[in-house]
Image: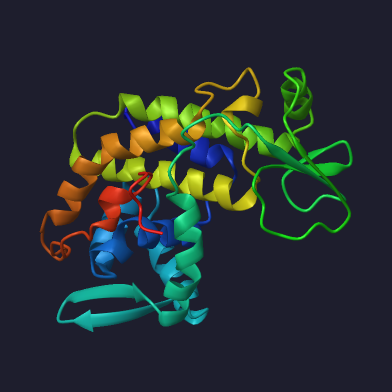
Amino acid sequence: MDPLRPLIETLNADGRPRIWSLVITVFGDCVVPRGGRIATARLSRLLARVGVETGAVRTALSRLSQDGWVEGRRSGRTSSYALTARGLQEFAPATQRIYAPPRERSVGTWVFDSPAVGGLKVAGGGLRPAPVSDAPQGMRITGALAPESAAAVAEGLDPAHRLALQRMAVDLVAQELVGDTPLDHAAARLLLVHRWRRLILRWPEVPTDLMPADIAPRDLHRAMARAYARLTPGTEAWLDTAEGEMPAMPAASEDVARRFSFTQSS
């Protein structure tokens, strides 16, 4: 069986993949730290490994170009793409959130706002780990959660949020079956980061303390950090490889080694 099949199946379980969104994930994860430009042949090869046809990649690049996210360039027989200045500007804050390090310890203090100002929806308000920097817009309570509160918060999760957590957990277990082939590692890392990116940017954080009991691993953030570290050597080796119209990419910046690490620069 294809070792990537479980990861591809969960990607398709979300509905028809948005190829342009996968392309954006590739740029943020693999291209920006390596000079900012990728050969179309390499991008197509990577996405083909997860089941995306070359024509669909071209269509996605055309759409992103028209929307001002990427710009193309041709040199002889080789075509390549890079993010525009606008695309780079949009990436910065999202990148910090996506590759932030996992929590070192359990959440001790929580902030409850009513009405909700982001956070997990519970009892008509929003629950977030302390500290928070915004000013209260109504009632704000800061304190510890009683042990029995975790189950109540988990039960109140939006069904779509719970499903996103479950599929993230499934992918984190599935990636352990991916062998040592560099392209497979690159494809697995792409799919993991793509799912993680959508989870982190769409939904509020669910720390391990409040993770539903039926989701394993419970500490998704730490499991993601470990999976990323496992898949990165093979991924970077594939990005270093030259083949046909797929030239080797420039060396990775030090930022890649610091992703999900407590030594990240602020």
Which quarter shows the N terminus?
top left
Left or right: 226 in relation to 91: left
Residue drawn where x is 44% and y is 33% of the image: 222
Q: Is residue 260 above or below residue 168?
A: below
When asked about the image quadrant of residue 250, the answer is: bottom left
Taking depth in this image into account, of 87 and 106 the one nearest to the observer is 106
* Residue 62 shows in the view: no
Taking depth in this image into account, of 129 and 256 the one nearest to the observer is 129
Q: How does the figure colour the protein chain or chains?
A: rainbow
Tally of numbered discs: 0
Q: Is residue 222 above or below residue 41?
A: above
Residue 168: where, in percent of width, then height? Answer: 52, 34
Residue drawn where x is 42% and y is 73% of the image: 88
Left or right: 27 in relation to 210: left
Residue drawn where x is 74% and y is 27% of the image: 145
Residue drawn where x is 41% and y is 59% of the image: 266
Q: Is residue 243 above or below residue 73?
A: above
Residue 204: where, in percent of width, then height? Answer: 65, 45
Residue 229: where, in percent of width, then height? Answer: 29, 38
When asked about the image quadrant of residue 109, the answer is: top right
Residue 115: where, in percent of width, then height? Answer: 87, 51
* Residue 264 shows in the view: yes
Taking depth in this image into account, of 251 and 129 the one nearest to the observer is 129
Left or right: 123 in relation to 174: right
